[in-house]
Image: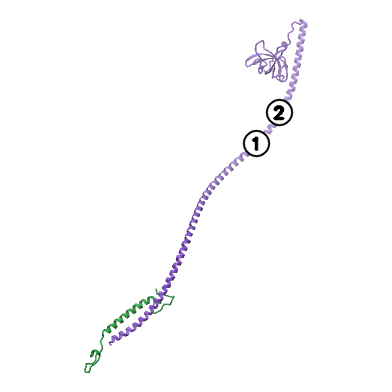
Chain colours: A purple, B green
Amino acid sequence: MHILSKIFVVFAAVLSILLAGLTMAFAVNADRIKADYANEQVRRQSAVDSAASEQSAYSAERGRLNQQISDLATAVAAKDADIRELQTSNAREIAGRREAMAQRDEISNKTKVLEETARTQSKLIDGYRTEVTALRDNEIQFRRRELELEDRINDLESRREVLEQTLRSLQEQLTEVKNSLAAAQGGVGASSSSDSATTFVDTGPLITARIESIQKDPSSGAIYAKINAGSNDRIRDNMQMYIGRGTEFIGHIIITQTDLNHAIGRVDLLGRKVEVMNGDTVISRLR
Amino acid sequence: MNQFGMQMPGGKSRRGANPDVFTALLFLSCAALLAACVMVFMQGSKIGPDGSAFKIQEAGRISLPK
């Protein structure tokens, strides 16, 4: 055998041993890796199943959470709307508050002005009251003095009327005396009527009155009228006055009876066909 | 009779052996074994623990080189 053959035989033996060891180790390792791979496959499958179940649970949870998020979003939108509404209401309330404050200030200013006005008016009223009190006192004193004067005037008027009556009676007595003297001197046939002797026309201040009632004496046919003026208005018996209606002259009235505020007189129409009426004017003398 | 290794009397003296076809076959087998060892070593290094082709993986605790 050639030396190379021998060497190759030795090499082949050594390489065969080495290859056998390597092959055994490789085979064992491959087998274990395969077993472990199978286990890993099983584990992976279980993990996949678990992941799928977890995924489904997660999906359900996600759906539930999405629904909850949607509900919360709706609630948030509603709350936002409420917030906007409340903000609008708040702004409106703030504006109303400002307006109310402005009105309050305005009212306060008006109140101050009114207080000042009331104070001023109170002062004026006090002044007026003092003045009115003084005026009332003066008026009372004036009234009292007026009453005293009226009493004095009435007394003087009564005394004057008494004196006039006395004067009239004295004049009548004087007339009667004169008539008696005339009768004694020339006889009785020249005597005239007493009416024409005592009738007179007042020459003092103008007296104006009105006829209140008219009455006719059935026995004599004379007309008597009542006027609304008496002795207080200087009306005296036998005073001749003039009756008129507007600018029309009606006739005479001879006063026959005098009262304080009324007088009665006989109407003389002077033969004219006129008629005396209530309300006709009676004056003391012609103007 | 030389071809049977027999030396006949009066024959020439015997010479050294020459490489023959068996030597070539052994060479080829050695080359094939060497190639197989290299390949198995390389692949075993890939699946062996700590990159060693001769170590054995522990069951349930497989560790492969990175």
Reply above or below: A164 against A96: above
Quadrant of the rendered structure where residue A21 is? Answer: bottom left
Mark 2 or 1 closer to N-term? 1
SS for dot 2: helix
Bin the neighbour count of mark 1 within 10 Å (Cα to Cα): few under 14, some 14-19, many 20 and up.
some
Q: What residue appears at the point 74 percent right and 19 percent down from the top-left corner?
A: A161
Q: What residue appears at the point 36 percent right and 81 percent down from the top-left corner?
A: A20
Q: Are marks 2 and 1 in contact (CB under 8 Å)?
A: no
Reply above or below: B51 against A57: below
Disc 2/disc 1 C-alpha distance (Å)? 25 Å
Q: What residue appears at the point 43 percent right and 69 percent down from the top-left corner?
A: A45
Say which of A13 and A73 sits in front. Answer: A13
- The mark found on residue B23 in the picture is none
Residue B24: where, in percent of width, then height? 27, 83
Marked residue chain, label 2:
A
Q: Is residue A78 visible?
A: yes
- The mark found on residue A125 in the picture is 1
Quadrant of the rendered structure where residue B1 is? Answer: bottom left
Disc 2 target residue: A143
Marked residue chain, label 1:
A
Q: Is residue A79 left or right of A200 when viewed as pictured?
A: left
Q: Is residue B52 visible?
A: no
Check the picture and name the quadrant holding the N terminus of chain A.
bottom left
Q: Is residue A226 left or right of A74 when viewed as pictured?
A: right
Q: Which amino acid does the dot numbered 2 rest on?
A: Arg
Residue A273: where, in percent of width, then height? 65, 11
Residue A90: where, in percent of width, then height? 53, 49
* Residue closest to the far bottom: B9
Check the picture and name the quadrant holding the C terminus of chain A.
top right
